[in-house]
Each structure stands twice: as structure tokens, then as C-alpha cells.
């Protein structure tokens, strides 16, 4: 009887120490620290967005009441919308709503903002996630092949093509893609979004062109950056010479040694890009009639739909912050120097 | 104590039966826009199993280039001629694929800066395992890991089992250099080249690493070439010393003989440039006056002539490296002979003789 108790207590102790190890690990501490830094930052962003919407000209109450409304009617609408209360009070109300998941209603469609977001966010997330995957799936092999023989035929062709495509802004890229794939080849739909519920293939076909419009310039950017960094590592890094001196084949040196080190630079770049890419979706969603967050925000801005604009801008900013948080954590996972800390 | 048997026999004489590396008239030229750079201009030496040879010279003397040429580690712009036979295999002109099989297996190298020559993203163990499995693909990972730990013990890295899993940044400079040596020894090479391998380390660690190299050379019978600018290092550890200047060997002898009778004014100047404990503090450091020669426009005569205090018009004709004394070769028209010993140091040497 006593022995059983003893073993259980040891087990509990072990479990506790394991939990302690996980929580006390440098990685867990790093994540906690980053979240602690991100929280006030996000708070500051929400205040900034709120202040911005306050400052822009135009009166939402008058907008809502209509052109022919009398002063009294406008005042009544203002009271009804709660706009007569002080800004600080309204901000705190919004913040409280944000925490409890009540973001108010759209002044245009009268729908709750949360249900609008639930409808629109998956589209934008799908576009952005696929754009990143596609751009990296193109950039990494291309960069590795180009860096294998710098100045070789493949390298030169890649450099010229990537420079050309990089010079094309994504809205022009979108129109070119439509022209080639939808108008000339008639192989892909030019506009419209098919939900995942209607089949994976149909869904993927509908997002192919917008994803390519976002991914191609990114792929060129990443390929050029990674190729440059790889060539630099191969030419001047001492550990590359060590690997060569071991008799390791050039391809293994490139892939197994140089790429490991170059991937950190690439990761930083991806993190910095996420904010910009989410912004890029505003234009691309508009061109391809994707019912995403970008279009929602654009419509909100046009119709002074404060509740919608406030949360959309906040989400765009928050994504940039969180993306960098994720990149920091990824560094820690990938780079032993951070994972184990310096001695 | 060294016997006569221990001294090197110049290649021009008979080939020693234990010779593992025979270098003959090795030349390296770098093509570029403008006149080509003549980095190594016909050097010959032989290296025996279990011997430690020091190649000494300033930066740009060609010491490092000459060994990188043996390893096939020079950029494509390098043109290598002459001959270098590693246990019968001609290395000059060998295709990259065959060279790759020799590199790391028969001839290995330890580099200058251990902080940068290990891959920061790979564990110490993974880097040694890679060295083992590159040349013996049939070795299973677990067996290679065992061998890696063995190698770490061989280079006397404390707590080898734990260090196996650690990353380079977790080790000190001396420990990293031990790991580099373990990597170099992974396939039991016949020749181990240490290119300024202790330059980046503090003096105590430097001595420990040198003693490790001497110990390995004696225990494993590996031939070791140390490349250094430090004559003192060569004096303490090497069996034989080659002094290089402007891509040529200017003096070559068994260590004891060389330091007993330094003949070539350049070697003398190098010795004089080592600060001595007896030198009063705050006195000027001895330097060799003038500039190292431009390797794309070498003079027809002795390359050291413009900086040499003993130079005269005879030096505009290049002196050949000649065995003037038994097992002591030097290329000089006006060597410091025993009769000169009383004369004070001159010109190039400003402070003390620095004789060891």
C-alpha cells in the first residue's frame, strides 16, 4: 500500500518536473516574453486605429441618417449609435466588446461584425497562406539550382526573369494572369470565389489566379535574396570550406550546410513580408472579386462603416505583429544558438 | 632527440622510403584581369609519416595557397602546375570527383578560426558523423556516432558524450579546435594540415592544441604540416622548417639546425620580429622594413632584395635554393655565416636578435 503511494508521488513529481522543464525552457520563456511585448503593442495599435477613425472627416451619424435628415434626426441617430458619448468611453466600450467577442453591428448591412469576419477571414487567410506556400515552393528550389553554378545559364535566366517579374506590380500581374489564363486559354475562372464546401478542386481553381498574382512577385524576391545569400555563404563562409575539406559533395554543401544558414535570413524576410502581403490582398481581392477581409474593409471605408473598418485595420496590423512573433519563435526552434542561449 | 635519420631529405636527393607526400616544383598562378598573380613559384619538399613540418612565412608568402592547392580547395581561377604525389597518387590535375574522395580521407585540414569553421546550425556530433560517413557510406549512423565520440575522446575533449550533442557556440575556442581536429582525423588521414590552427587561440590553449597535434602525430603516425607566421611555434614543435617568401622556399632545415644557424637574412628578420621577454617595455616593436613583394610583378632577382640589409647588385640575379650545408638549404648570396655572429643586427632588425 505504502509502496503504491510512494510510486505515485514519484510519478507526480516527475510529471511536475517535466512540466516545469517545458515551462522553464528557454523556448517557453521566449514565447512568453514575446507575447508580453506584443500585448501592449496591440493595445497601442487599437488606440491608434480608433483615433484615426475619429480624426478622419465625415460624420457617421449624418451618413447613417441620410441626406435629407433634419438636425434633430441626425442627433437622434447619433444618440442611438452612442456617438454622443466621449471618445474614451466609446473606445473602452469597444475594447470590452473586443474581449467578449461583441464587435457591434455593421452600419450598412446591419449584420453583427463578428459574423462578417467569420465569413470573410477564411478567404483572406487561404489566399495569404497559399501565396506564401507557393512563393516558397518556387523560390527555394530555384534559388538552390541557381546558386549551384553562379553565373551559369540557369542562374542568368532566373536572374533576368525574376528581375522582370519583380518590376511588375501585383495588380498589373493580376490583369496579365487574367488575360492569359482566363481570356486567352479559358482554363481558369477570372473572378469569383468558390467555397471549400463546394469541393476542394473548384475552390483551388477559383483561388489560383489571385494566389499567383500575390505569389509570383514574392517568389522572385525570395529567389533572388536566397540565391544571393547562398552564393555568399558558398564563397566566403569558413564552415563551407570545412565541409569541402571533408570531401562533401558540392550539392550537399549547398543544401546541407549553406541553406541551413541562409534560411534564417529568408525567414526574417518572410516575417517582414506578411504584413505587406495582407495589405496586398486588398487590391487583389478587389480585382478577382474575392469576398475577403480586404474587400470588406474597402467597402467599410467607402460607407463610413466604423465598426467594420476599426476591426479590419486592427486585424491587418495585428497580423504583422503576430507574424513577427511567430518568426522570432521559429528562429528559436531552428537556430541552436537561440534555442540553447549563449553560455 | 633527433637523429640524422629524422632530418628531411630534399626531394632533389633520393626519396625517403617513408615519404607520404612528395611535392615537386609546385606552382600556383591566379588568373585575373591584369597581370597574373604568382602565388607559389616552384616549391619542392617531402613529408614523411609521423613527421611534423612547419611552413613559415608572412601573409602572402604563398604558404596557405600551397597547401590549399594540394587539397584542391583553390578557386577555379587558380592554375596549378608541377607535381604533388600523395602516397603515389598525383594530386595536381586530378579531377574534382577523385579529389573529393581523397580530401578528408587521405589529406585533411584544420583551419584558422574555429569560431567560424564549424557550422553553427549543426551539432558537433552531426558534423563529425558527416565527416565519417562521407567517405564510408556503409557505416551506420549509430556506429558513426560511436566513432565520433571515440574521436572526441581521442582529441581529449572533456565530457565527450555530452559534447557530442552540443552546438559550436556552446564550446570554447580551444574545444572547437579540438572538434575540428576530430573532424580532420575522422578517416585516419595520412597527412593533416593545420593552417594557422592556433593563431586565433590564446597562448595557453595554443600550447595545448600543439601538444595534442604532436601527440596524435606520434600515436597515429600521421604526418602533420603546420602553416604559421610564428617561427617560435615552429621552433617548439616542428621537426623541420620551411621558410617561404614570395611563393618560394628561401630556407629549409631540420628545426634544431635551422635555429642554431639561421642563414637567410629574411629568416633572421622574422626571428627578430618576435618580441622577447627581455625587451624593455614600451620599446618599439621590431618590424621588417618595406612591403611584401607584389606577386604579379616579382623581380627577376631575389624577391627579398628590396627589403634586405645585405643586398647588393649580385642579388638582382636570383639565388637558387641550394644545400650549402648538410640538410640545410637556403637561397641567398650573402647568408649570415658563423663568422658574422659577432656583428650586431642590422637594418631590418631594430630590436635584439630574437635568437631562440
Image (tube, coloured by chain):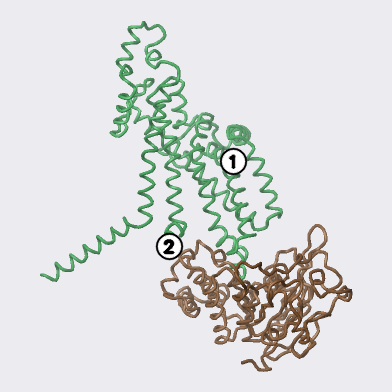
Chain colours: A green, B brown
- Give the class, few, some or many, for how many residues have Cα within 10 Å of label 2's Cα (few <14, many ≥20): few
Q: Position of residue B59 (x, y in %)?
A: 70, 67
Camera-side residue of B239 and A335: B239
Q: Is residue A249 left or right of residue A260?
A: right
Query: Label 1: chain?
Result: A
Q: Is residue A302 left or right of residue A74?
A: right
Secondary element at image label 2:
loop
Q: Position of residue B33 (x, y in %)?
A: 80, 57
Camera-side residue of A97 and A190: A97
Q: Say the numbered circle drawn on residue A163.
A: none
Quarter of the figure with residue B306 = bottom right
The answer to the question of whether label 1 and label 2 lie on touching residues, with beta carbons closer than 8 A, is: no
Mark 1 vs mark 2, CA separation in Å: 41 Å
Secondary element at image label 1:
helix
Q: Can you say whether B59 is above or below B207 in the image?
A: above
Residue under the image location 66 percent in, 42 percent down: A163
Tell which circle, 1 or 2, labels the residue nearer the N-terminal end: 1
In the rendered image, which residue does mark 1 sit on? Answer: A217
In the picture as drawn, the residue positioned furthest to the left comes out as A1
In the rendered image, which residue does mark 2 sit on? Answer: A343
In this rendering, the label closer to the viewer, 1 or 2: 2
Judge whether residue B223 can be spotted in this image.
yes
Amino acid at each position: 500500500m505504502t509502496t503504491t503511494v510512494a510510486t505515485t508521488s514519484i510519478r507526480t513529481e516527475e510529471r511536475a518536473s517535466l512540466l516545469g522543464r517545458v515551462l522553464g525552457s528557454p523556448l517557453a520563456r521566449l514565447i512568453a516574453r514575446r507575447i508580453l511585448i506584443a500585448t501592449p503593442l496591440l493595445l497601442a495599435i487599437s488606440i491608434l486605429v480608433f483615433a484615426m477613425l475619429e480624426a478622419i472627416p465625415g460624420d457617421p451619424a449624418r451618413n447613417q441618417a441620410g441626406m435629407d435628415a433634419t438636425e434633430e434626426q441626425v442627433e437622434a441617430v447619433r444618440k442611438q449609435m452612442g456617438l454622443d458619448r466621449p471618445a474614451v468611453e466609446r473606445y473602452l466600450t469597444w475594447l470590452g466588446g473586443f474581449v467578449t467577442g461583441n464587435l457591434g453591428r455593421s452600419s450598412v448591412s446591419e449584420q453583427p461584425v463578428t459574423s462578417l469576419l467569420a465569413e470573410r477571414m477564411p478567404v483572406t487567410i487561404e489566399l495569404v497562406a497559399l501565396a506564401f506556400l507557393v512563393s516558397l515552393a518556387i523560390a527555394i528550389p530555384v534559388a538552390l539550382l541557381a546558386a549551384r553554378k553562379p553565373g551559369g545559364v540557369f542562374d542568368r535566366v532566373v536572374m533576368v526573369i525574376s528581375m522582370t517579374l519583380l518590376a511588375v506590380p501585383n495588380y498589373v500581374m493580376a490583369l496579365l494572369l487574367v488575360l492569359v489564363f482566363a481570356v486567352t486559354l479559358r482554363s481558369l475562372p477570372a473572378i469569383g470565389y468558390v467555397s471549400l464546401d463546394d469541393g476542394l478542386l473548384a475552390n483551388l481553381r477559383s483561388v489560383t489566379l489571385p494566389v499567383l498574382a500575390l505569389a509570383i512577385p514574392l517568389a522572385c524576391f525570395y529567389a533572388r535574396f536566397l540565391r544571393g545569400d547562398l552564393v555568399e555563404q558558398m564563397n566566403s563562409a569558413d564552415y563551407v570550406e570545412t565541409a569541402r575539406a571533408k570531401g562533401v559533395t558540392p550539392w550537399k554543401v549547398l543544401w546541407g550546410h549553406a541553406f541551413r544558414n541562409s534560411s534564417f535570413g529568408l525567414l526574417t524576410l518572410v516575417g517582414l513580408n506578411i504584413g505587406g502581403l495582407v495589405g496586398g490582398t486588398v487590391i487583389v481581392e478587389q480585382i478577382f472579386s474575392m469576398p475577403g477581409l480586404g474587400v470588406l474593409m474597402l467597402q467599410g471605408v467607402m460607407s463610413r462603416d466604423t465598426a467594420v473598418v476599426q476591426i479590419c485595420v486592427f486585424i491587418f496590423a495585428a497580423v504583422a505583429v503576430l507574424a513577427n512573433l511567430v518568426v522570432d519563435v521559429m528562429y528559436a526552434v531552428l537556430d541552436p544558438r537561440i534555442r540553447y542561449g549563449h553560455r | 632527440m633527433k637523429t640524422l635519420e629524422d632530418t628531411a631529405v630534399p626531394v632533389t636527393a633520393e626519396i625517403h622510403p617513408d615519404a607520404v607526400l612528395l611535392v615537386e616544383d609546385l606552382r600556383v598562378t591566379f588568373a585575373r584581369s591584369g597581370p597574373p598573380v604568382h602565388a607559389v613559384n616552384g616549391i619542392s619538399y617531402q613529408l614523411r609519416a609521423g613527421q611534423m613540418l612547419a611552413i613559415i612565412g608572412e601573409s602572402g608568402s604563398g604558404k596557405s595557397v600551397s597547401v590549399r592547392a594540394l587539397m584542391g580547395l583553390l578557386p577555379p581561377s587558380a592554375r596549378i602546375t608541377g607535381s604533388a604525389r600523395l602516397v603515389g597518387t598525383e594530386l595536381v590535375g586530378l579531377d574534382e570527383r577523385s579529389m573529393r574522395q581523397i580530401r578528408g580521407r587521405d589529406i585533411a585540414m584544420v583551419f584558422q578560426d574555429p569560431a567560424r569553421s564549424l557550422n553553427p546550425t549543426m551539432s558537433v556530433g552531426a558534423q563529425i558523423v558527416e565527416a565519417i560517413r562521407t567517405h564510408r557510406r556503409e557505416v551506420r549512423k549509430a556506429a558513426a556516432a560511436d566513432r565520433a565520440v571515440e574521436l572526441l575522446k581521442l582529441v581529449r575533449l572533456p565530457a565527450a558524450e555530452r559534447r557530442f550533442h552540443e552546438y559550436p557556440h556552446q564550446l570554447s575556442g580551444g574545444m572547437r579546435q579540438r572538434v575540428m581536429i576530430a573532424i580532420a582525423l575522422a578517416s585516419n588521414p595520412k597527412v593533416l594540415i593545420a593552417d594557422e590552427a592556433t593563431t586565433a587561440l590564446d597562448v595557453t590553449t595554443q600550447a595545448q592544441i600543439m601538444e595534442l597535434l604532436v601527440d596524435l602525430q606520434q600515436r597515429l603516425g600521421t604526418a602533420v604540416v603546420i602553416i604559421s607566421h610564428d617561427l617560435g611555434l615552429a621552433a617548439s614543435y616542428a621537426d623541420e622548417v620551411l621558410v617561404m617568401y614570395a611563393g618560394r622556399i628561401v630556407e629549409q632545415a631540420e628545426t634544431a639546425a635551422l635555429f642554431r644557424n639561421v642563414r637567410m637574412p629574411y629568416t633572421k628578420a622574422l626571428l627578430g620580429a618576435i618580441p622577447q621577454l627581455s625587451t624593455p617595455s614600451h620599446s618599439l616593436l621590431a618590424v621588417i622594413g618595406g612591403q611584401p613583394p607584389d606577386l604579379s610583378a616579382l623581380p627577376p632577382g631575389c624577391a627579398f632584395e628590396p627589403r634586405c640589409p645585405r643586398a647588393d647588385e649580385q642579388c638582382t640575379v636570383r639565388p637558387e635554393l641550394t644545400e650549402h650545408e648538410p640538410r640545410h638549404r637556403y637561397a641567398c648570396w650573402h647568408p649570415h655565416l658563423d663568422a658574422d655572429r659577432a656583428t650586431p643586427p642590422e637594418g631590418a632588425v631594430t630590436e635584439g636578435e630574437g635568437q631562440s
